[in-house]
Amino acid sequence: MGSMQRIDDHLHERMKQLVKMKNGRSLTEEYRQAIEHWIAKETQNILLADSQILNRMEDRITKAEERLARMNGRTGMDVSIVLTGILNLLAKQYGVSERQVYEELRPVAAAHFSNSKKEF
């Protein structure tokens, strides 16, 4: 059995009136039901608040992912423009195809990229 708690007189009187109107359960049972109802409602409110926080976090993460994807796409396009320009200039300067310049530089760049501490 739990500990005894004091309830304000006006609330206790109102509960006794409700018990008389229902004419079926004891005062103790009505208090028990009221407390269980309150606990269930508060638990539901907490869960709802938690789910709203989770939804907000998911929305923010989704927006950040989308922004990063757009930035990555723009960066990729810019790199592609620079690469195309450099390949074109080198091909014209050395009288070879852009493909030949690319195939010669690609392995060197890949090795440097995978181990940036190495010197060229």
Image: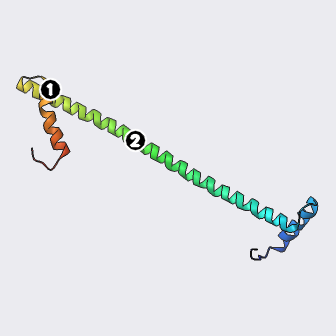
Q: Nearer the viewer, residue 116 or 53?
A: 116
Residue 50 picture location, percent across and down: 58, 55
Q: Earlier in the sequence, mark 2 or mark 1?
A: 2
Element type where label 1 sits in the image: helix
Farthest-out residue, front: 1
Crowding at label 2, few (<14), some or many (≥20) Cα neighbours within 10 Å? few
Give the spatial CA distance, label 2 vs label 1.
32 Å
The residue at which mark 1 appears reads as 88
Q: Nearer the viewer, residue 93 or 13?
A: 13
Farthest-out residue, left: 94
Q: Is residue 106 above or below residue 3?
A: above
Residue, x 42% and y 45% (percent of image)?
64
The residue at which mark 2 appears reads as 67
Side of 20 relative to 88 (left or right): right
Amino acid type, label 2: Arg
Amino acid type, label 1: Asn
